[in-house]
Image: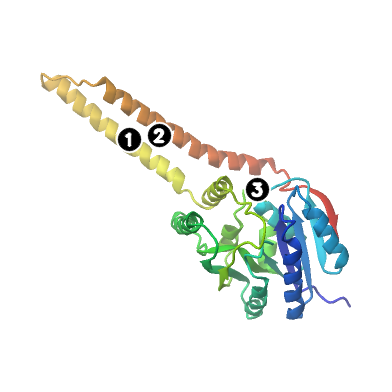
Amino acid sequence: MKEQLCLSVVSPVFNEEAVIRSFYDDLARVLRETGVTYEIVFVDDGSRDGTFIALSLIRNEDPGHVRVIRLARNFGHQLAITAGMQAAKGQAVVVMDCDLQDPPALIADFLRHWREGNQVVYGRRSHRRDETWFKKFSAFLFYRLLRRLTRIDIPADAGDFYLLDRRVLDILNGMEERHRFLRGLIAWSGFRRVAVEYVRQGRLAGETKFSLWKMLKFSLDAVTSFSFVPLRMVSFFGFLVSLVAFVGILVTAYIKLFTVYTVTGWASLMVVVLFLGGIQLVSIGIIGEYIARIGDDVKRRPLYTVQEMLE
């Protein structure tokens, strides 16, 4: 009888030719030392360099443990992870990036906590090395604001480095929403979880693929997926402006009817008009973001397309 596969490691890859070999060597060594049956699922998210060739060579060297999924184009980090999750066969799945900022050696601790009954084990960054002050500050601000804006207990300082039990994974794989914030979906699902603290290292080679624009888009996906606070703020500002306008009407009518003065000021009038116009446009934009996400989900297009699989 074939032994049941214990662990799958899912790693999304995008233009990581310079580091992928070192990552595989470190990861394979750690997994062999754990003594569990394992597979490594690499998801090439539309790389434009020699990443897929490097992955093909690794797979040919270790066909019993390595699988490669090549997406037809770049679908983004969260959907690449989703593709790997849906292909994973293990009873537990570890998700991690291949830039070696998250240490593969921590997987042994993840497995230990999993065997103790925790369905979610995640890495929490106690310190970030070789990162700019802006990156550290924006990450600090992002997690704190997100926890205040949502009712979901999303762990602070935790990235996409975690172990999931098969039961949690099956729930995530059943979700079809396109704008995915996986850390939030994992927290939403509940289950028993524990954190493992570690020091996040600098990249071994290459450059980060998370530009400022991608960070902003990622933050927007996180907020709109789990919070209605932006919509409630629109309602609040609408009520506040209406209240101020109503008071202004009463004051203007009183001055006109019961005093000898008149209300003047073309410049102040234009400022108020432009201010209200700005609020209206921002409000429409916020509502539009929610509607656009609903539209994407209603279309029910595939989350990703696969060009090639090396099994």
Is residue 88 visible in this depiction of the protein?
A: no
Front disc: 1 or 2? 2
Q: Residue at x 79, y 75 (%)?
A: 37
Q: Mark 1 or mark 3: which comes first in sequence? A: 3
Foreground pick, 47 / 221: 47
Q: Position of residue 284 (x, y in %)?
A: 48, 34
Q: Residues within 10 Å of mark 2 (few under 14, many from 20)?
A: some
Residue at image position (27%, 20%) is 266
Discs 1, 2 touching: Cβ within 8 Å:
yes
Foreground pick, 208 / 258 = 208
Quadrant the N terminus occupies: bottom right
Which residue is labeled 3 in the image? Answer: 178
Eyeballing the image, is 254 above or below 94?
A: above
Q: Secondary structure at mark 3?
A: loop
Please say whether residue 283 is visible from this viewpoint.
yes
Q: CA distance from mark 1 to mark 3?
A: 35 Å
Residue at the disc numbered 1: 241
**Label 1, label 2: how many angstroms apart (C-alpha)?**
9 Å
Q: Nearer the viewer, residue 127 or 10?
A: 127
Of the 4 image quadrants, the one containing the C terminus is bottom right
The residue under the point 41% across, 32% down is 278
Q: Residue at x 34, y 26 (%)?
A: 273
User: Can you identify the residue that label 2 sits on?
Assistant: 279
As shown in the figure, which amino acid type bears the numbered disc 1? Answer: Val
